[in-house]
Amino acid sequence: MSLKFNLPTPLSRAGAMVLHLVPRWSARLFWASSGWRRIYTQGSSVRLKRLGYPRGVYSRLACRAYSAAPGSPEVMLTPERYPVQRLPFSTVSEEDLAAFECIIPGRVITDPEQLQACNVDWLKTVRGCSKVLLRPQTSEEVSQILRHCYKRNLAVNPQGGNTGMVGGSVPVFDEVILSTALMNQVISFHDVSGILVCQAGCVLEELSRYVQERDFIMPLDLGAKGSCHIGGNVATNAGGLRFLRYGSLRGTVLGLEVVLADGTILNCLTSLRKDNTGYDLKQMFIGSEGTLGVITAVSIVCPPRPKAVNVAFLGCPGFTEVLQTFRTCKGMLGEILSAFEFMDTECMQLVGQHLQLTNPVRESPFYVLVETSGSSAGHDSEKLTNVLEQVLNSGLVTDGTMATDQRKVQMLWALRERITEALSRDGYVFKYDLSLPVERLYDLVIDLRTRLGPRAKHVVGYGHLGDGNLHLNVTAEAFSQELLGALEPYVYAWTAEQRGSVSAEHGLGFKKKNVLGYSKPPVAMKLMQQLKAMLDPKGILNPYKTLPDQA
Amino acid sequence: MSLKFNLPTPLSRAGAMVLHLVPRWSARLFWASSGWRRIYTQGSSVRLKRLGYPRGVYSRLACRAYSAAPGSPEVMLTPERYPVQRLPFSTVSEEDLAAFECIIPGRVITDPEQLQACNVDWLKTVRGCSKVLLRPQTSEEVSQILRHCYKRNLAVNPQGGNTGMVGGSVPVFDEVILSTALMNQVISFHDVSGILVCQAGCVLEELSRYVQERDFIMPLDLGAKGSCHIGGNVATNAGGLRFLRYGSLRGTVLGLEVVLADGTILNCLTSLRKDNTGYDLKQMFIGSEGTLGVITAVSIVCPPRPKAVNVAFLGCPGFTEVLQTFRTCKGMLGEILSAFEFMDTECMQLVGQHLQLTNPVRESPFYVLVETSGSSAGHDSEKLTNVLEQVLNSGLVTDGTMATDQRKVQMLWALRERITEALSRDGYVFKYDLSLPVERLYDLVIDLRTRLGPRAKHVVGYGHLGDGNLHLNVTAEAFSQELLGALEPYVYAWTAEQRGSVSAEHGLGFKKKNVLGYSKPPVAMKLMQQLKAMLDPKGILNPYKTLPDQA
């Protein structure tokens, strides 16, 4: 049996799905090339460039909040929306500024206009009022800064690319902003092992480009790659699009250099695949969101660059069929399956409406994006073709399209990756990032649609199905306490009932810190508080984040 | 070009290497089947059976130490060989025994004969003098035991399969031995995600069998699998033979249940691929060798069982060629490469001499074992055949043999896996487990041969080349302080100079705890001490292990 598979140019609605075996596959297909990313990087503002921010969709959006467009409201100060009290830290004095200036001459920013973008998260939901931004270039400088802050009892907000989803990357009050933006040097790369050692402020996309030129890829990829820093990725234990294949940063990060609250430099920056000498201290800092130490350098192992990448975009008649398609792919694609993403029909409508992206297949209740990455184009396409025949013939998939060349692969990925952007254009977004048993993953979306009724503009579900990770998003014309009350704690309680996680990959930051108890028992929370007290006894590092308010 | 590849039955020295493309490969090849393991499990002693110990090579060897064979010397008590002072813990009293008997009726063992095997490590190098062995079945029992010990200031030695290499699994003095042997129940298995939740005392081999029947495999495999417990694997962050493909336990372990020093149960036993809610506490216990808490249950994600496994065993003319062969395999086998092991010619001589295994290829200075695991037998063999053609034609490999059926695959693996056993039959073994830059990996072996001269019987190098992990072993007729003095600290200093790790996968346990400083800076060691003090303020958990003696 051999079906033909249509590869429309440009992507258009395909009719009945037809398989076409391309005789020779490109040996260097790779979807994360700079060309593709250009979609996102157009239009970055001059101000951001001046600040040295990497360009990208997130910085562009963050900038928009301050573009003084008519009718664009100022973001509410965090303590005005949330019940939070400033802790008794010192306030930055002229003497402090002079001390900082001694440590990093010319890199102490106090200009209010320049501080704006660093005080607000890119989702425009929280805003601090920090008066100073510090831009060190070395770990030694970070150490001196923290030593000073620790002595003076000044709170510090470590900041990477400021692309976080939970308000963890901006100050809540007037914390000193410690940016890693100028710590952007690659320290070493080993071209046999693929081990990269670099400073924390390297932008993920730039690292991707760097290692790709050397025939490797980064083990993680995110929509925010054009802005996010590797240090921030590690500090938040970022998941993203390659998690299914390359696993957690807890396995791929080999070493860290961290500056502790009192300025002590902890050098665990080894480049060894295996090292069982004592406790693995770096793990404490992975995912601690800057509350236990400031990550200043990262050692990470990069997988070899796949020689062939294929993407299939498929329409499924129901969520049961989505799950069945996943099982089939897992079984038949085995080691070459590198992503299995899903989105519902409302997501497709939103990317069409707000970003003018075209649905390449017949309208369906659900869509899945299947990616393979392997070392043999011929073998990979044969495996994928077998899968597609199977899912089509068994009715799991009603329509689909497959891409093998870079441009089309990119266009298909954009449908999934730009959902976040489309949502942010739809209004105020209530965002939930949940781990749930795959079987129940979509039930919550259906449940919420009924529960919220016309109060919500859209209730959508999409995400990394292969990892059991649902991105549940609810849009409304504007923020509303009433809608929030209908959502929370309902969503968290629902998740806890399924023994899920109330934050799969986004972390807790400021906005979710008080829901930790839905996923962790009191004993664990107490231990976390002890760990915090041990490593940061004055609590100066990223205060008001990650851990719940103490009773 | 198509060479023929010889598949001798039984394995014999092949002449010139010839490639033979097998028309149809078995769809269910898998090397870790019970049949294969039978090689190792013959002859387990009745006593071990009575004790409920799983059979296997290590328990067999451990048993031999007590078999009262003529001339077999009693293992020296640890404090007689090593300079170690008993800390001021309480001594187990009759009241304590009565309290234990209340908690776990009939499972408090005080019979000296039964205690023997638990007091000595399987390498016969360290021996404690514990008077009591406790065999709880539930976490609640472990909790009650620890609550009692904590209150009474009784030191506790948590023990899994007692297969450790560094004296971490047996008491140093009279610590209470807390065995996980009866905590051997599978709690749940999810047949789509492959997530297994089980008690800590499940034997790795039994878990392997369990998940294989459900079309998955364990993400780790060790020579000691017939005896080692999953809890011990996690507590020591075991590496092993599948690390190259499936990565570290830090990525594959999803959740843990741990009983803390004071008896508090910490339940982080989630079954979620992603969970970024607060600090990842389980990571503190992975690799902490029972010094921070007692692991009582494990949640771990299992990869799908590969449909095809191929093994090639190759002879290389030099270490440079070994490295080049590795690069070639990495590049051409990509995602299906599942192991790349090497051994030197002396290892081959030892497995021949002590275990009567036959070298299946022409004698060479080095041998490598390449394993592929994939989802398509045809594709995999095509890839491997291409590699073999390439390495043969370029002179990287001078001879080789390839196995596709289970029995031969097992016989080839035995050559590599049974080196440890052959060494232990050669005399007293000084064992080093080092992470080094692959380029320098073998230099230390050559260096040591010159340095030690005739004082050593054999100086051999083998290990997980793909992970940069060298097992360096030196045999002598008997333990000798003079030889030890020639080896240490020389080996550690040499490793530190290369920025390597003095314990890649074996951990520090009792025997290596004072060399931590060769791989970790003082700041890290101080933090480790703080972590220990936080979690185990009385220091009752596995004392004298992992952390260096305090100044």
Image: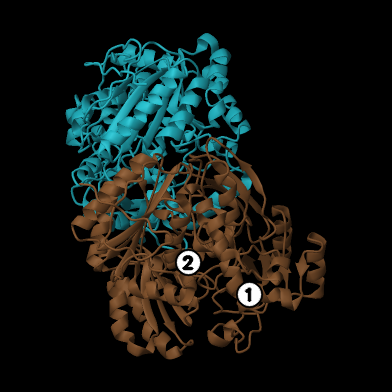
Chain colours: A brown, B cyan
**Which of B300/B368 is in front?**
B368
First reached walking from the N terminus: tag 1 or tag 2:
1
**Which of A523/B346 is in front?**
B346
Quarter holding residue B358: top left
User: Are there few (<14), some (14-19), or many (20+) residues within 10 Å of tag 2?
Assistant: many
Q: Is residue A341 above or below residue B430?
A: below
| Residue A262, percent from left and from top | 67, 60
| Residue B190, percent from left and from top | 24, 55
At 55% from the left edge and 70% from the top edge, which residue is drawn? A168
Chain on which label 2 sits: A
Label 1 sits on residue? A63
In the visual, does A344 lie left or right of B28? right
| Residue B199, percent from left and from top | 27, 51
In the visual, does A387 lie left or right of A247? left
At 79% from the left edge and 60% from the top edge, which residue is drawn? A103
| Residue B264, percent from left and from top | 36, 61
At 33% from the left edge and 73% from the top edge, which residue is drawn? A345
Quarter holding residue A467: bottom left
* Residue at disc 2, secondary structure: loop
Callout 1 amino acid:
Cys
**Which of B388/A34 is in front?**
A34
Can residue A273 be seen here?
yes
Callout 2 amino acid:
Gly
Label 2 sits on residue? A507
Q: In this view, does B281 lie above or below B233?
A: below
Alpha carbons under labels 1 and 2: distance apart: 23 Å
